[in-house]
Amino acid sequence: MNDWHFYEPRAGHGLPRDPLRAILGPRPIGWISTRSAAGVANLAPYSFFSMLCDRPAIVGFSSIGAKDSLENIRETEVFACNLVTRRHAEAMNETAQSAAPSADEFKGAGLEAASCKVIECPRVAEAPVALECRLIDVHPLTDLMGASAGAWLTIGEIVGVHIDPAFLRDGLFDTAGAGIVLRAGYAADYFEIVPEAAFSMRRPTN
């Protein structure tokens, strides 16, 4: 039996690239839209993103570095999570680049913005799903010793959900049919959810 590759992250992984983002993946992408207090629209993707609770419906994403999205959310206490699909992948990638706070990433990526219903925030008009969220907390992340990680966990409650009816099948959201894109881990790697990858398995009952 071959020896396992073992490492302690603080001491280095000894591999060409850090494997953790690939191991803990693929991950859904939170395509976060915000508006500054001055009214400038912002749109940026975050792959450290997930649903944290269903009742109440809570989502969270981590910003590595204090970016414009984080500042806007602190100012307005609202944000929207837009679903990234294969047809939006290139536009999503455009919004990943650094831009001045005065820049409108919707326009830069050639995307149409639509208004949310419950909150004052733009959403991606063509995204098959958009989640309107109100801020619960922005939590600075630290290491075991309490030193800053230079990252902030933003937690919000979903207060409104937009679903394109084209992706509702018998009242169920068609995850595979929507072509959702996931972040795979290394610099240019992504996955698309396709019907061939799906399988069913129910939890056992006592």
Image (tube, grey):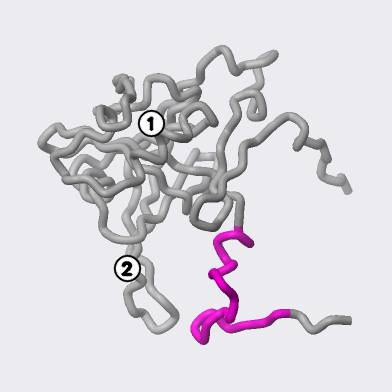
Depicted 186 relative to depicted 121: above or below: below
Circle 2 is placed at which residue position?
A: 150
- Look at label 1 and name its amino acid: Glu
Q: Which numbered disc covers residue 132?
A: 1
Residue positioned 26% across, 32% down in the render: 108
Along the polypeptide, which appears first: circle 1 or circle 2?
1
Question: In screen coordinates, is 104 left or right of 89?
Answer: left
**Which image quadrant is residue 38 in?**
top left
Between 186 and 118, the one nearer to me in the picture: 186
The magenta region covers: 5-24
Residue 164 in the image, given as x and y percentages of width and height: 51, 16
| Residue with the most extreme left position | 38
Q: Nearer the viewer, residue 21 or 167?
A: 21
Quote the CA–CA distance across marks 1 and 2: 26 Å
78 relative to 28 in the view: left or right: left
Residue shown at 36%/60% (left/top)? 64
Dot 2 crowding, Cα within 10 Å, few <14, some 14–19, many 20+? few
Would you say the magenta stretch is mainly helix, strand or loop?
Answer: loop
User: Does 57 appear in magenta?
Assistant: no
Residue 120: where, in percent of width, then height?
Answer: 24, 28
Is 124 on the left or on the right of 52, as rendered? Answer: left
Residue at 42% across, 48% down: 46
Q: Secondary structure at mark 2?
A: strand
Tell me the amino acid under the disc marked 2.
Gly
Asked if labels 2 and 1 touch by Cβ distance under 8 angstroms, the answer is no
